[in-house]
Image (cartoon, helix red, strand yellow):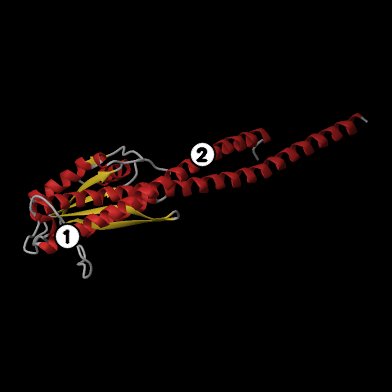
Amino acid sequence: MASAKEIRNQIKAIQNTGKITKAMEMVAASKMRKAQDRVLAARAYSEGILRVVGHLMSAHPEYKHPFLVERDEIKKVGVIVITTDKGLCGGLNTNALKKALGLMKKQEVDVEVFTIGRRAGMFMRRIGAPIIGVAENVPDIPELSDIIGLVTLAIEKYIKGDIDAVHLVYSEFVNTMTQTPVTMRLMPCPLPEEEKHGYWDYLYEPEAKEVLEGVLRRYVESLVYHALLENKACEQSARMVAMKAATDNAKDIVKDLSITYNKARQAAITQELAEICAGAAAAG
């Protein structure tokens, strides 16, 4: 059994660690609420721009934009993978990377990878996947400018025909306790559902085809940006839950060590009493 001093030092070290995890839990909880608000705002924007695309397509059904046309032959596929830059967020990144790896294995053609977040880049380099674009050190309050270079690269490669489809992998925020890794096809764009009711009308310049070109680019960018916001909300939620679990575990360990410490101290006192009694008996 370890000495009482060693156990006391262990208790102090674990208590200090518990204070750190408790502080990290509180910081993550604060950031999570703000991240949730940004996710909700982004969802409304994505739904609105998709509705505009549907209206413009219905106005010119003869126009087939490259972003909306299925290609006859798929020779190469691009996959954009979004993870966090930092760890300490439970199995969030592991689940997303498993989802991405499963998607890549399903493809019967070559795959090129675009990574957002350091964890995705580390994993893809470890398995030897060809990485075409990288975006790392994304702040907790991300801007579109943080990822626009990577998204533009994916769009240009798709337009040129270097890749024939682009998929997106990220973690979707469900609630504080649940974050679900999801995949979606980014290009060709998911077609909007046709609205059977309602009235719409726009005043736009120049003609609808050029407007549709610009709107579709914004739509693709908004999908990736929205996925990044979802992932940020998931990161803070997962980190809050993980740090709370770490804090609770620290308390349990301290409780167990306190019992062990009391036993060790009691054993030491008992031994001292026995030695004193033995010495007194020998002297008498």
Q: Residue furthest right?
A: 284
Instruction: Identify the secondary structure beneath mark 1.
Output: loop
Image position, residue 204 (x, y; %): 13, 52
Q: Mark on residue 23? A: 2
Q: Mark on residue 21? A: none
Q: Across the whole image, how many numbered discs are drawn on residues?
A: 2
Name the residue type under label 1.
Asp
Instruction: Identify the secondary structure beneath mark 2.
Output: helix
Residue identifier under label 1: 201
Which numbered disc, 1 or 2, marks the residue closer to the eye? Answer: 1
Q: Residue furthest left?
A: 62
The quarter of the image holding the N terminus is top right
Report the Cα–Cα distance between label 1 and label 2. 52 Å
In the displayed structure image, the side of residue 48 where residue 275 appears, left or right: right
Name the residue type under label 2.
Ala
In the displayed structure image, the side of residue 105 where residue 20 appears, left or right: right
Residue 103 visible in this rendered orientation of the protein: no
The quarter of the image holding the C terminus is top right
Tag 2 or tag 1, which sits nearer the N-term? 2
